[in-house]
């Protein structure tokens, strides 16, 4: 079980891992050994996630979410399978934890009387500057 918090945990059976060859530098090792990990997690069909978390996670995932609703994380920062596997799982946990936090509702506020007065004074000043500009004679 991947422990997200005290009430949410993702079952290992819901995760699918594929080991693939990593790109980039690494010499002969990178060409021979499949150390990169592609972690797949079906966000839309997961019984472990509440509906609101599922929706926020799908939005957060962006391009990493397939059309079928599967989150694909690729980890290839490290030279060993074990560290890349742990990295992919940590990134999944962080993403789900981020999706747990519900966004705060914006409470609309009104400007204060002083702020309105400052705005009107600034507008009047600007208007005056523009009026001065238009009444000048040009000597071209």
Image (tube, helix red, strand yellow):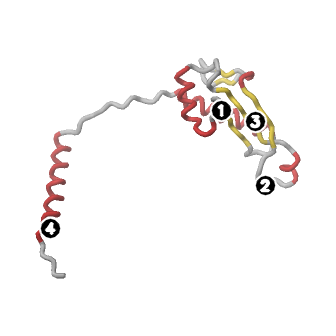
Query: Disc 4 versus disc 1: distance between alpha carbons?
Result: 61 Å
Q: Which residue is mark 2?
A: 25
Kind of element beneath mark 3: helix
| Horizontal side, residue 8 vs residue 38: left or right | left
Mark closest to the chain's N terminus, 4 or 1: 1
The spot of residue 106 in percent (x, y) is: 36, 31
Q: In the displayed structure, would residue 101 be above or below residue 117?
A: above
| Horizontal side, residue 95 vs residue 19: left or right | left
- Foreground pick, 93 / 42: 42
Pair 1/3: label in front: 1
Query: Disc 2 versus disc 1: distance between alpha carbons?
Result: 27 Å
Pair 4/1: label in front: 4
Q: Which residue is mark 4?
A: 134
Mark closest to the chain's N terminus, 3 or 4: 3
Q: Which residue is mark 3?
A: 85
Mark closest to the chain's N terminus, 2 or 3: 2
Mark closest to the chain's N terminus, 2 or 1: 2
């Amino acid at each position: 079980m991947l422990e997200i918090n005290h009430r949410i945990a993702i079952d290992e059976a819901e995760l699918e891992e594929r080991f693939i060859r990593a790109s980039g530098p690494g010499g002969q090792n990178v060409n021979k050994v499949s150390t990169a990990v592609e972690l797949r997690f079906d966000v839309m069909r997961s019984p472990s996630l509440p509906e609101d978390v599922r929706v926020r996670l799908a939005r957060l995932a962006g391009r990493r979410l397939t059309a079928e609703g599967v989150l694909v994380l690729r980890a290839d920062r490290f030279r060993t399978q074990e560290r890349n596997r742990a990295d992919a799982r940590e990134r999944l946990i962080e993403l789900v934890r981020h999706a747990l936090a519900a966004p705060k509702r914006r409470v609309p506020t009104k400007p204060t009387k002083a702020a309105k007065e400052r705005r009107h004074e600034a507008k009047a000043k600007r208007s005056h500057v523009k009026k001065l500009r238009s009444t000048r004679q040009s000597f071209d």
